[in-house]
Amino acid sequence: MALICSMAGAQMAQFQALYIYNFAKNISWPAEDASKDLVITVIGDNELGSELTKLAKTKGVGNRKVVINQVATVSNLPQSDIIFLGESKSNLVANLTSSQDGKKTLIVCGKKGLCANGAGIAFVSEGGKLNFEISNNNIKKQGLTVSAKLISLGTSVD
């Protein structure tokens, strides 16, 4: 899993989609969800939503089928395993994290620094490279467990 990628404009969504799939594979999801679809909801990033939809047609996470939802706001969110909050909607992070408190949802944001506001993972793009910040504490607060491997590949902010 190459976690630092060089990219140009349109490739960003492709790389982020692959990262999100890898994040999903490195989270211990509740045993009772093993036979359910893995639901990823994207807020405010249609290009990423499209890339995830393409991946979901051919890839699952473990034995779970992946379902992608795209929404414009944090109100009335569908039950989700992963919620991605696009950079253009980053001002909604506090509302999102409070609405998902204790729901076993991984919150991934498209803007650096949002782990300080409750996100589990936040993408960082610097010098044409994509990486991520990760808050094991925030992920644990959601009732999820993340692999040590994933923590070591990102920049821990705890």
Image (tube, rainbow, N blue to C red):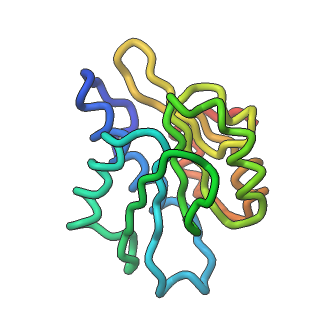
What is the quadrant of residue 67 in the picture? bottom left
Identified at 42% across, 60% down, the residue is: 69
Q: Which residue is at a point 78% across and 56% down the rendered structure image?
A: 141
**Residue closest to the eye, 130 or 76:** 76
* In-front residue for pair 81/94: 94
Q: Is residue 157 left or right of residue 153?
A: right
Q: Residue 84 in the image: x percent, y percent?
A: 51, 47
Q: Is residue 29 above or below residue 23?
A: below
Q: Is residue 85 above or below residue 56?
A: above
Residue at point 39% right, 12% down? Answer: 127
**Which one is nearer the viewer's eye here, 7 or 67?**
67
Q: Is residue 24 left or right of residue 115?
A: left
Q: Could you tell me residue 116's position as x and y percent?
A: 74, 32
Quarter of the view holding residue 80:
bottom right
Quadrant in the picture for residue 16: top left
Q: Nearer the viewer, residue 83 or 152?
A: 83
Query: How many numbered badges does the structure rendering display?
Result: 0
**Horizontal placement of 125 versus 144: left or right?**
left
Q: Position of residue 50 (x, y in %)?
A: 28, 49
- In the picture, the quarter occupied by the C terminus is top right
Residue 57, placed above or below residue 7? below
Q: Position of residue 78 (x, y in %)?
A: 55, 66
The residue drawn where x is 27% and y is 48% is 51
